[in-house]
Image (cartoon, coloured by chain):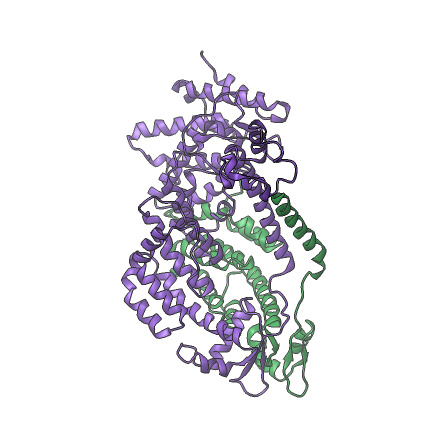
Amino acid sequence: MAESVQQIISLSSHLHSPNLLSETDYVNRVQELVAILRRSSQSLLSETVLTDLSPHEHTLPYLFVLLHQIDLARSRTRSALPDDIKPGGRLWSPAVQFLREFKGPQVHFAGHEWRQLVNMILDAAEDDSKPVLAVCVLSGAIMRIDQNVCEFTSLHPRFLRLCLLSQSYSYALPVLDKHISSSHTSLEQPARGDNRYMLALNHDANDFIAEAPDISARLTHKDIAQYYLYGAMIYMTLKEWDKALHWLSIVISFPVVNSVSKVMIEAFKKWVLVGLLRHGKLVTAPKIISSHVMKIYQAVARPYLSLADAFEKSDEQRLRTEADLGKSVWCADLNSGLVRQLFQAYDMFLVLKLCRVFSALTTRDIAAKAASSGLVSSAKIESLIAFLVMSGVLGARLLQRPCDLSLSMLRFPKSIQPYCSRSRMRVGLMRKSHALELLSHNCGECNNELKIGRENIDVLVRCQGWSGVTGKGGGKGSIDHAAFGVDEDIMGDLS
Amino acid sequence: MNNPPLSQEQLAAAISSAATPSKLFDILSPYEEEAYLLSFQDNRQAELLSQFYAAYFLSHLLTDQIYEARFLTKRMPQDLLQTDDSLQNCVALLRAIWQHKHESVYTILRELPWPDTLKPIVQIYDTYFQEKTLREVSRAYETIRPATAASYLGLDPAATERGDPATIGKLMAHGWTQDEQTRLLHPNTVVDDSQQDDQLYNDLSEIMALIGSRRG
């Protein structure tokens, strides 16, 4: 069937007001447009000029015409990354404009093409040693394509890697702070007309969301592990130790059969150091890690564990010796920065430990007790303590004396004003509440997919004639698990 | 959707028109890409780039993004950073804040030369830093010597020490008191938004209800 540019533009224009279309109509029209664009001849795409189109109004035609022009530039220069697509090149600006303005829901139906463009932008920026340019534009693009679904794609780890390379960490935060709730590990295409397409949760007519596996390439164990490791590294640079620790604990808890991946080993080493920086001690490993994996970790991260032991025991001399001995190890593992920060943290935890024991102390007392560390003068100690109190780490108050400049008193009143304001606490609580809601929703979805939801169990019980079990309380004690031949965990759902 | 191109007029207008520091940050943020590309051009406008990066850096500090401000100094054109006075001031300022050297912070803000375009934002940061430190000192100290308070708050140490009414008056305005005998200052802890208890309680109830409903 021969199509014309007018027909394509007209079909694209019909998608401007999705609220006038039913969900099925909208999906059908977008799919029809994508199919036409995919089979369009080169001459047809060449006829359309990019400057005549708006990426927001005509997202799909713009994407296909842009890709066609990139293909032309490639074949003309016989290069995979022609100068035209590199930052500052002829096609760089249209590509960036597209990623800033495209309509997310439409792009879901042309995921393969979208991914092609994004990968090209990433490759071009990295090849030209200007990764920051790709990071600026992709942060917004990732958020726009996935406003509600929170799906993990192959783009996520690549994007974080570029954020690390360009040292532009704040651009990663909107993506990192979003809880991932789904991922596709296969390349199966959605069947036309099935129920895989759904409306966005906020019922905004512009937010038709489709589950489109081809937005992402095939995902592997390594992609997910790398994503969490890179994410943790970004949190480390911003000194958000709690989040970094959590993300690292996800990586080190990955299920394994025999061997442990290199990414997991790297994560374990960083997890030891971040634990020391956050809590001043080697934190307890997640219970989910099997003993044989833990043994592997302990064997390969021995210098780190020795360092942690010296830190925990407040043995400053040994800490310095261990840090010197392991210099080549920290350098090779790119952990020198974290090890350097341990010394600052050591002073801080030394003071915090003393403050836990006494209810009031003078700076001279602290100087005497911390004689082994570099904190020799009262002035240095007061400056450290003032910093700890002012930044909210230590809940105490300082009393200066009128004449004695070298002596200040540190008191720990029973009731200290919370350093975190109530409004900040409320924002934090609301965030956690939304995360819980999402988690709870997805747990329900998982239960349904695995057919272990309450309704499925009820049906199963009814079908097999186990009347009297459900409905009447169904307390744990009233069910004979062995008799049902159903796994105990599954029956746990009944209680 | 498209911003006007980066120019000195545009930058000056952004600095003077932004109602809040976060608005200034939001206005300057999209220009980083353009500034970065400009920095690779042969005939780059060094003055414009220097003023943009310095203003963007200060907008980070005004929005309490100290770590990001540090990484911005790594993303700036490094040759410009090494030679430009304003950007060198920014690096010195960052170092002083990082090392909690309050006196140096005020010296850099008040005594080093800043271009006219940046002066308003430098002045805003001076006030912001002083007020922030005042809140922190109020929380940390029960009694504080006038000289220590002066060094934290960028006040004249001699005037504070001798109890100059104009200097001490600024602290009294924040509820601080002074012991006539010992000359020690007693800071007044600033308590903020305590009336939000009801909302906090409601939010907590919602979360508990959510957890409760999952157990049922």
Of A490 and A485, nearer the camera is A485
Residue B145 image point, x, y percent? 59, 81
Which residue corresponds to the image point at 69% horizontal and 51% vertical from the top-left? B202
Name of the residue lying farthest toward the top? A1
Q: Residue at x 54, y 77 (%)?
A: A358
Using residue A19 as the reference point, say whether residue B36 is left or right of it.
left
The answer to whether residue A386 is visible is yes
* Residue A211 drawn above or below residue B180: above
Q: Tell whether A48 sits left or right of A204.
A: left
Examine the image and state in which quarter residue A397 appears: bottom right
Location of the N terminus of chain B (image quadrant): top right
Q: Could you say where residue B89 lies in the image, as x and y percent from the top left?
A: 46, 64
> Percent from the top left, x then y, of residue A249?
43, 52
In the rendered image, which quarter is residue A461 located in? top right
- From the viewer's side, name the closer residue of A305 and A448: A448
Tag count in the figure?
0
Q: Residue at (48%, 80%) from the top-left corner?
A: A366
Chain depicted in green: B
Identify the image quadrant of residue A221. Answer: top left
Q: Which chain is purple?
A: A
Quarter of the rendering occupied by the C terminus of chain B: top right
Res. B47 in view: no
